[in-house]
Amino acid sequence: MRKIIIGVMGPGEKATAIDVQNAYELGKLIATQGWVLLTGGRNVGVMDAASRGAKSVNGLTIGILPCYDSQGISEAVDITIFTDMGNARNNINVLSSHVVIACGMGAGTASEICLALKGNKKVILLSVDEESQNFFQKLAPKNVYVVNDVENTMALTKQILNHTKT
């Protein structure tokens, strides 16, 4: 049976303390569900925090790296996929995920959300500013969900998975 992969996307160096805290908790909860965590794989911000959270409960983590070498990889990534594609790897991130969770906002995260919506993926916006919420909801009102905390994010993820084919 195919494993459920949950993508957690968010800022790297510009992640806020709340983004990092939420990402860590998401990683833990995703792993405790037996799901696989997918991130951009770097050792900064949301990517690192989500991976560390999943590893804290022995979860499986995948990192889709923008580079071709091991510099800057999170130590909490189990499976590294080197793309040497830079930001173009964002499409791999979102298309490989059953559900995409945006934890915070930055330019890279915004590109991932847009690519996910183009791929008809469900996207959950966690603690994303109101302007971004409005923008993405106008683009794809049936595929964008807004939540304000990790618990509601997990409940919504389960609901989405129950209503979509994996």
Image (spheres, rainbow, N blue to C red):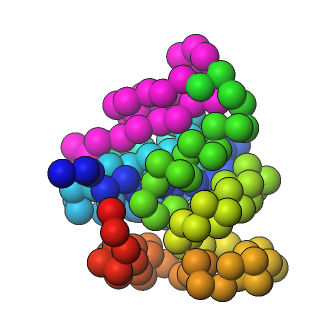
7 to the left or right of 144: left
State which quadrant residue 58 falls in: top left
* Percent x, y of residue 64: 52, 35
Taking the image as drawn, is residue 155 in sight? no
Q: Residue furthest left?
A: 1
Numbered circles on residues, count: 0
* Percent x, y of residue 152: 42, 82
* Percent x, y of residue 103: 58, 63
* Percent x, y of residue 11: 67, 51
Q: Is residue 75 above or below residue 3?
A: above
Rendered residue at 50%/45% (across/down): 39
Q: Is residue 138 above or below residue 36?
A: below
Magenta-span inclusion, residue 42 = no
State which quadrant residue 153 falls in: bottom left
59 to the left or right of 23: left
Between residues 45 and 146, which one lies in front from this camera angle? 146
Taking the image as drawn, is residue 79 in sight? yes
Q: Looking at the magenta stretch, what is its main secondary structure? A: loop
Rendered residue at 47%/36% (across/down): 63
Per the rendered image, the range of residues in magenta is 57-82
Rendered residue at 44%/27% (across/down): 80
Q: Is residue 56 above or below residue 20?
A: above
Magenta-span inclusion, residue 77 = yes
Q: Quadrant of the C terminus?
A: bottom left
Rendered residue at 29%/42% (across/down): 60
